Amino acid sequence: MKKSALQIARASYLPKLPDAIKGGVRCTEGAATQSVANQKEIAELFPNTYGMPVLRFEKGEAREYPAINVGVILSGGQAPGGHNVISGLFDGLKAMNPASRLFGFLLGPAGLIEHKYMELTSDIIDEYRNTGGFDIIGSGRTKLETKAQFDSGLEILRQLGITALVIIGGDDSNTNACVLAEYYKQIGAGIQVIGCPKTIDGDLKNEMIETSFGFDTACKVYSEVIGNIERDCNSAQKYWHFIKVMGRSASHIALECALQTQPNVCLISEEVEEKQMTLDGIVNYIANVVAARAAEGHNFGTVIIPEGLIEFIPAMKRLISELNDFLALHADEYAAVPQNEQIKYIIEHISPENAAIYASLPEGVARQLTLDRDPHGNVQVSLIETEKLLGEMVARKLAYMKEGGKYNGKFATQYHFFGYEGRCAAPSNFDADYCYSLGYTASLLIGEGKTGYMASVRNTTHPASEWIAGGVPVTMMMNMERRHGEMKPVIQKALVDLKGEPFKYFAAHRDQWAKETSYIYPGPIQYFGPSEVCDQSTITLALEQGSYKA
């Protein structure tokens, strides 16, 4: 296979490891833990894996480990650095005992259930070091949640002599890993299950998991392109660019991209919900920024919008909820309505309050709200062109303001959605190092005989040599939430903390960014060069850890 010059050069990069896990290690245990909420319910559901201590690896004496066969699964959406997690896991296992073997299950958890796998040898691993994507074994979104699935997986694990399984995924995937660990412990299967924290959305984080892998790279990719757009924006000075970025459940990506590029407007879904903002309120806010800049002769600007914004607007959330319920009950009847009458049909069959909101939407967005639902019966938010909805509604508002003499500018729009562009990028140095360390840490957790843990690497705004490696019980991150009409144990999502340092910094500067053209142009990810350029963490992480220098 032909490779680019960067691929060839990047293959020789040696990821950095924490000094504490180079060579012999010893495992120290902290105090017993409890879940973040619903302690009684979680303890009852996980009697074999609840309350375990946080673990930390420190320098220790070298020792011998028995050879072990390990399985690995990539689960859910792709995130930069997944291949380095597998590389770190492979190298860690081989360092403990060269006779150890690693098997990859193909296309996600389905590979475990359907017994589809391949052995990962050094020749294969070496082809994928420091590369983006999950294509070494593929990924998938099959959920591991039933006894039949667990038992089917156990068959192939026993057939291959595998006694430990590493699941690389987000909050749902690691929740499933914890359920699997509990089940295998309960039946005495002798199978360890270890998780690794992955998601570009950045919503799998807590005091022990400082960041999920892939977030750093994805935000740098999006910020590069946003910076390019800002430069074009400032050059042509004739467009307002409405830019939607990934992040359905949380706005971490939007916030980080705003910190890196300083746009004129960035909306944070969590703030919209906290302030009970209406769609009109958001439109008025953007329109007033546009008008203020126009008064200074600046008929251009940039707006960053998180993917999940529409579900955080209380009135829109109620509308979507009613549409979900109505379409679930009347899908066939709705499908039989002629397309040119479908909007009228919806307006006539939902509550007056929601009908009024629905009628006010641009026709294209109104239709998107009634598109096919996802497997859970919910609207597919990524298909809703929120950026166009806001752009069109701002245009209407500005026309109204112009009639009243409150606006005298020009308003032309361009629309963008950055999503898949960032999911499989070649990992930044930070993610290459972080992911490799996570995989290596997972191998050490296996060597210690642990199960129901997630690999944890902390102190990540310091040099990699000073990072702290260990493990955190997955039950420690859990709470109970309603899923499909019943309460289920799940890892608690981390939303943008409106009292946290990253948001506070953003809130303190956004008025200035709105009025002035304060754009920053981050440029492409740098893999070779000074450490302060190549190894920098996200601004979010630096602000949270108190190491950001403005």
Image: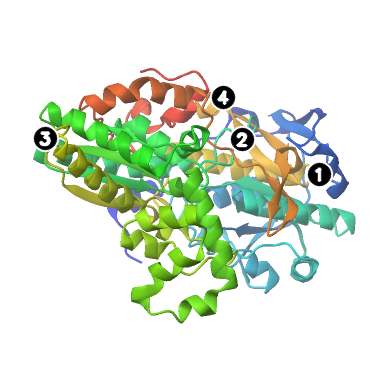
Q: Give the spatial CA distance, label 4 vs label 1.
A: 34 Å
Considering only order in the chain, which callout, 3 or 1, is on the residue closer to the N terminus?
1
Check if mark 2's residue and mark 1's residue have beta carbons within 8 Å.
no
Considering only order in the chain, which callout, 1 or 4, is on the residue closer to the N terminus?
1
Considering only order in the chain, which callout, 4 or 2, is on the residue closer to the N terminus?
2
Q: Quadrant of residue 191?
A: bottom right
Considering only order in the chain, which callout, 3 or 2, is on the residue closer to the N terminus?
2
- State the image coordinates of residue 113 (x, y, percent, origin top left): 69, 70
Q: Secondary structure at mark 1?
A: helix
Disc 2 vs disc 1: which is toward the camera? Answer: 1
Could you say which disc has been placed on residue 466 in the image? Answer: 4
- State the image coordinates of residue 531 (x, y, percent, origin top left): 38, 27
| Residue behind mark 1 | 42
| Residue behind mark 3 | 408
> Can residue 398 be seen in this snapshot?
yes
Check if mark 4's residue and mark 3's residue have beta carbons within 8 Å.
no
Say which quadrant the N terminus sits in.
bottom left
The amino acid pointed to by label 1 is Ile
| Residue behind mark 2 | 209
The amino acid pointed to by label 3 is Asn
